[in-house]
Image (cartoon, rainbow, N blue to C red):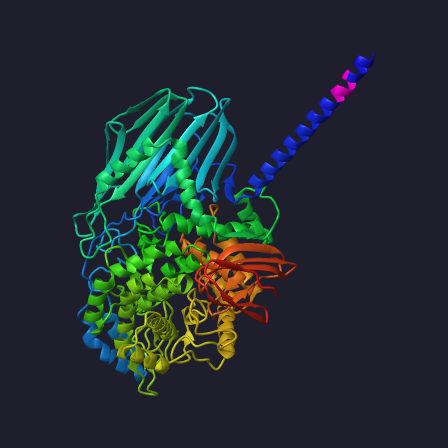
């Protein structure tokens, strides 16, 4: 009996241990679920419909494409639809541009400029406008009025589509599709005919290959037919264990331009794989991985732009990718990606992500509140920049690296009157400085064509670019002077050189880029002329980007002398040049001339209504709610207007912003994004949030792509930059903590934001008050930190951490 009692108690002990183990296992699973739910993902309970055909009209968005999920490694892009019975993966390659080098410089421009300037100074705007229209435009087709696919300007184009047909029409259950921002993979899972299927897709930067892994929980259940297509100019063949799509794009002159090649191959576990003339067929496999590589013969070197060994590159990358074990290929991809992505983390809420992303977007339109969606938008912008702009690649264009048409909106080009610059506003503050480098490569490549344009159009030294450029060195004005005579593009681009330096203090970089910065400065030194009324230096004839005013002589025009935008970007350029020359120990006569010219520039002026003036006189604008807010460059991204140092100008800038919004401004995605940044610089978190919410409720798609509309990626990048500006600023030489957080962001934390001077900053706050700050000094030196009205100065050492107390 005693023995039985011992056994009874022993069983209780065993039962207790087992229950404890089960409880711990349950807790572990709960923790895992919490971790999974709190990680940042775009996720959906249904696929995008791969069977719906795209529109050919460039400015008409394709609703199903805007549900697909983007992947990219800077040079190769993919949009994954996640179809069950038929999958579509739309492909892009960074240099898939039609067109070719072309001379669009207009020799009639220079002889007419003195007369145009005289007309403008005399108030004869009608005569000035007519002469400008005739002479200050591109020779030839220019950009084709934004439809340049078949003219020399060209268009960024789709690489084509990878189709995967599973030859099934069965119902399916338990569908899940996600883009995991933390490892840059798309995952698809579902159950069909009693079989659980999974797909994992990623685009590797270190190995330059896209991989798609198919698995099932039952053997022999994976069968499909793959094919590669393009809307035009392609042929497909098989060679050995590869399916190859190749062709040549139009050069815009009736011949062939750049050549391209895409290779597809498969590795299988059991079953069989066959390569026919135009298809890759998989039958009854347990597991299959597809590998895809692509390239063109493009090289970013003026004037040839040819020479990449694309055939051997695609072959080499494909074979190396297949030779690696799949898990190693995946791990190499994740490790490479996370060294950039994991630098920054933003937390505004502890709520779990239990709502599909497309539902969140729709819900936001109603309730205008979702802190998790704000976190997602912030990190999504960082993800998209890592995916579309890598060292050695071309810079992110109007659509990043993703576009599904032969003729993309506005050619998918580089607009230099705000859009390509906005693409890179987040690069430094969001700790992705390396992703900024492709922009400098593009700038370097246009030195020679821009130098030719500067000489032909303006008889000036240095280099110039107008509101658009492409991969063929286009630097001429546009084909209409109303928008094409934006002359401030080069100055605005060149300011990015010093932005990168201010954050990194990398003198080797600055030495390398200094000639580009100096060349831009030389151009504007030659371009500026004294205003006969007051002797101040002004730019012109020029425009305030894309805006129109009513002149005193009754005409409607865009052309004037000294538009505020030009004056501000030139002031910023001159400041940058002075800082760069000082940092490099330059002290010559030219530097003294630049210092003198900067002091003589016509500066920002306040109108009779208290607003910052957009033109040299108080003209009435045709569109009071115009999308561009170019005359506020000095507030953001420039430094000339500051709430502490120039309070009256800051007040006038606020009035200008308020006026624009009252009249419908901020109605495009990128314009709303700029407003976030502008209000943040004014320390106005509530209006920054209103602008962010306007973007998120009206101008994002189910996959969170920003919409102009149509799709433009600058809204995504601008929103991320704006959120960073709300959390921290450093443009005044002081690291300003939480300068513009709205009340709804009551508690939170951000880790890894970068500040000028070579600092990374972690910030924690609760109930609207700063609770902790940690500063990592990468280069040493004085660090000034501000929270509200208190400023602390720290003498830092290289690679040391500091935690000032406020």
Q: Is residue 321 above or below residue 604?
A: above
**Where is residue 468 shown, x and y percent of the image?**
30, 61
Q: Nearer the viewer, residue 193 or 373?
A: 373
Q: Is residue 471 above or below residue 600?
A: above
The quadrant in which the N terminus is found is top right
Any part of residue 292 in sight: yes
Toward the right, the furthest residue is 1
Asked if residue 183 is among those painted magenta in the image, a careful observer would answer no
Which residue occupies 43% across, 41% down? 334
Write down the region rendered in magenta: 7-12
**Where is residue 390 shown, x and y percent of the image?**
35, 50
Which residue occupies 57% across, 55% down? 749
**Where is residue 701 shown, x and y percent of the image?**
47, 48
Q: Quadrant of residue 507?
A: bottom left
Which residue occupies 48% across, 44% down? 182
Any part of residue 705 in sight: no
Q: Nearer the viewer, residue 343 or 30?
A: 343
**Where is residue 590 shown, x and y percent of the image?**
27, 77
């Amino acid at each position: 009996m005693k023995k039985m009692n011992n056994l009874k108690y022993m069983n209780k002990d065993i039962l207790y241990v087992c229950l404890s183990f089960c409880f711990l296992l349950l807790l572990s699973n709960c923790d895992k679920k919490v971790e999974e739910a709190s990680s940042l993902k775009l996720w959906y309970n249904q696929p995008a419909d791969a069977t719906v055909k795209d529109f050919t009209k460039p400015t008409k968005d394709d609703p199903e494409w805007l549900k697909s999920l983007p992947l990219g490694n800077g040079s190769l892009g993919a949009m994954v639809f996640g179809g069950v019975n038929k999958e579509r993966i739309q492909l892009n390659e960074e240099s898939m541009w039609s067109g070719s080098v072309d001379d669009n410089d207009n020799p009639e421009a220079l002889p007419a400029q003195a007369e145009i300037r005289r007309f403008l100074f005399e108030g004869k705007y009608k005569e000035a406008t007519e002469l400008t229209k005739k002479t200050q435009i591109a020779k030839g087709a220019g950009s084709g009025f934004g439809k340049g696919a078949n003219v020399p300007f060209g268009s960024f184009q789709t690489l084509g589509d990878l189709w995967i047909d599973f030859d099934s029409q069965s119902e399916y259950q338990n569908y899940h599709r996600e883009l995991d921002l933390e490892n840059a993979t798309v995952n698809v899972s579902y159950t069909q005919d009693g079989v659980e299927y999974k797909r994992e897709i990623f685009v590797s930067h270190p190995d330059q290959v896209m991989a798609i892994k198919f698995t099932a929980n039952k053997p022999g259940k994976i069968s499909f037919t793959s094919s590669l297509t393009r809307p035009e100019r392609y042929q497909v063949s098989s060679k050995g264990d590869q399916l190859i799509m190749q062709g040549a794009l139009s050069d815009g002159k009736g011949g062939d331009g750049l050549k391209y090649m895409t290779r597809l191959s498969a590795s299988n576990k059991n079953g069989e794989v066959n390569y026919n003339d135009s298809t890759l067929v998989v039958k009854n496999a347990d597991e299959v991985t597809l590998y895809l590589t692509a390239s063109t013969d493009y090289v970013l070197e003026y004037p040839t732009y040819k020479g990449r060994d694309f055939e051997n590159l695609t072959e080499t990358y494909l074979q190396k990718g297949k030779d690696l074990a799949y898990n190693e290929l995946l791990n190499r991809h994740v490790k490479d990606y996370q060294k950039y992505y994991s630098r920054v983390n933003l937390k505004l809420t502890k709520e779990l992500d239990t709502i599909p992303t497309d539902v969140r977007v729709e819900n936001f339109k109603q309730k205008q509140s979702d802190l998790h969606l704000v976190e997602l938008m912030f990190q999504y912008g960082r993800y998209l920049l890592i995916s579309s702009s890598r060292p050695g690649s071309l810079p992110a264009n109007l659509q990043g690296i993703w576009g599904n048409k032969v003729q993309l909106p506005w050619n998918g080009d580089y607009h230099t009157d705000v859009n390509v610059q906005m693409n890179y506003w987040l690069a430094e503050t969001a700790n992705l400085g390396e992703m900024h480098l492709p922009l400098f490569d593009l700038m370097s490549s246009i030195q020679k064509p821009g130098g030719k344009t500067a000489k032909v159009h303006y008889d000036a030294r240095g280099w110039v670019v107008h509101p658009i450029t492409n991969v063929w060195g286009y630097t001429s004005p546009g084909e209409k002077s109303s928008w094409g005579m934006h002359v401030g593009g080069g100055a605005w681009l060149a300011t990015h050189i010093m932005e990168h330096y201010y954050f990194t203090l990398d003198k080797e970089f600055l030495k390398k880029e200094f000639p580009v910065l100096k060349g831009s400065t030389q151009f504007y030194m030659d371009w500026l002329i004294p205003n006969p009324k007051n002797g101040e230096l002004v730019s012109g004839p020029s425009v305030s980007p894309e805006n129109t005013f009513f002149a005193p002589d009754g005409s409607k025009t865009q052309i004037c002398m000294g538009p505020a935008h030009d004056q501000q970007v030139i002031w910023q350029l001159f400041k940058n040049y002075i800082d760069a020359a000082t940092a490099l120990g330059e002290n010559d006569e030219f530097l003294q001339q630049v210092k003198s010219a900067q002091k003589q520039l016509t500066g920002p002026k306040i109108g009779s209504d208290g607003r910052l003036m957009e033109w040299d006189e108080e003209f009435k604008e045709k569109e009071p709610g115009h999308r561009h807010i170019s005359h506020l460059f000095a507030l953001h991204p420039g430094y000339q207007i500051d709430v502490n140092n120039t309070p009256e100008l800051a007040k006038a800038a606020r009035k200008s912003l308020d006026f624009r919004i009252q009249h419908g401004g901020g109605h495009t995605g990128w314009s709303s994004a700029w407003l976030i940044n502008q209000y943040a610089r004014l320390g106005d978190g509530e209006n920054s949030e209103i602008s962010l919410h306007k973007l998120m409720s009206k101008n994002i798609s189910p996959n969170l792509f920003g919409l102009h509309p149509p799709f433009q990626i600058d809204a995504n990048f601008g929103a991320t930059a704006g959120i960073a500006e709300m959390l921290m600023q450093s443009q005044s030489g002081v690291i300003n903590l939480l300068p513009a957080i709205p009340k709804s962001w009551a508690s939170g934390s951000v880790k890894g934001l970068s500040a000028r001077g070579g600092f990374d900053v972690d910030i924690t706050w609760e109930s609207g008050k700063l609770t902790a700050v940690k500063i990592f000094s990468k280069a040493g030196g004085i660090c000034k930190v501000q929270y509200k009205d208190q400023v602390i100065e720290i003498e830092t050492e290289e690679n040391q951490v500091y935690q000032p107390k406020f």
